[in-house]
Amino acid sequence: MQFDSFASFLDMGGYGFYVWLSFGASAALILLLIFSTLLSHKNARANIARQVKREQRLQQAQAQAEAEAEAEAQASVSESTSQ
Amino acid sequence: MWKWLHPYANPEVSYHFAGKLKPWLGWASALLLTVGLIWALLFAPADYQQGESFRIFYIHVPSAILSMSIYLAMAIAALSSLVWQVRLADASAAALAPIGAVFTAIALLTGAAWGKPMWGTWWVWDARLTSELILLFLYLGVIALHNAFDDKQMAGKAAGILALVGVINLPIIKYSVEWWNTLHQGATVSKLGAPAMASEMYWPFVLCFLGFGLLVGAVACVRFQTEIITRNKMRPWVRNLVTSEVN
């Protein structure tokens, strides 16, 4: 241990401001890098997932519309044959 | 070697490989940085000339070395992407650029905060400092080009050419302290030969350097994964992956 008290540790032999500025700025930049990396990974996954869901909903809606159209056509066919 | 390397050119295999690698790199880096930084701040001796301000060394030098090694790695990736059209090389170059920019910024900031008490000035336009500042601008240019095109392949080409042209800056940074008169001191630590410093300063430096290096690896793994899924978002494996909860 190079320091005999917490105050002398903070003071860093008079260079406290410069030492803690260096360590603080570096820590801030590295934490920012880590968080932005994790956030952009999460966002990328969420964006693709949203796109997949949207396409699935579109497909579903399309299939439903086709089924309805077919049912309607069949109904009109059976109507015309019964008349 | 190609037989061994070939599966890693597959985005899905690489994605899962990076995913397996990242917790090991992350935890090893956390461990080394905790020990290294506590050692550097509390137990390493003060320099006989610079006093306690010398503790900035344990961040400044590792990040300066890393800023250049990351650039070299990025340029090699850019070269393999441009020459051999390795798609994943593009993704790794794009993943590395922001990490390199952060470590360059840290090297510049800690250098300024060290220069003020030691040289009496935050900044001088001398060879070492100016060339390192140019490295930061090169990184920012590469990042900007990667984001400037919707077509990732075209973006990768443009950014790759800039990255390759910028390689000329690396020997300039490295030898600037020998080629020009500069305030910056020469190399304290070199890979070959005995370090020009006491072992009670050398070992905490080694731990910090390895810790920061592994941190770069861990962050690079995550960014690489992000790049892979955004470049392959139409692939079924990516679609299954993002809709499941598994990472």
Image (spheres, coloured by chain):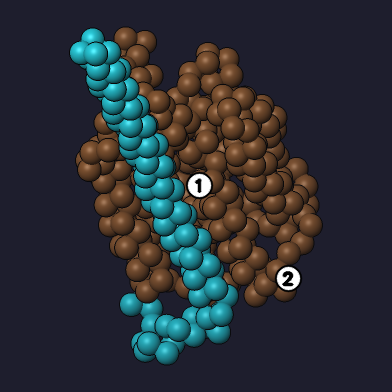
Disc 1: CA contacts within 10 A as few (<14), some (14-19) or many (>=20): many
Quadrant of the frame with the N terminus of chain B: top left
Image coordinates for residue B108, horizontal then vertical, percent: 63, 58
Q: Residue at x 60, y 36 (%)?
A: B146
Residue B170 in view of the camera:
no
Image coordinates for residue B165, horizontal then vertical, percent: 70, 29
Residue bearing the label numbered 2: B121
Residue bearing the label numbered 1: B99
> Above or below — where is B115 with respect to A59?
below
Splitting the image into 4 quarters, where does residue B203 fall? bottom left
Distance from disc 2 to disc 1, alpha carbons, whole Å, reads 27 Å
> Which residue lies most toward the front here?
A83
Disc number for residue B122: none
Indicate the chain coloured cyan by its letter: A
Q: Label 1 amino acid?
A: Ile
Q: Residue at x 69, y 46 (%)?
A: B137
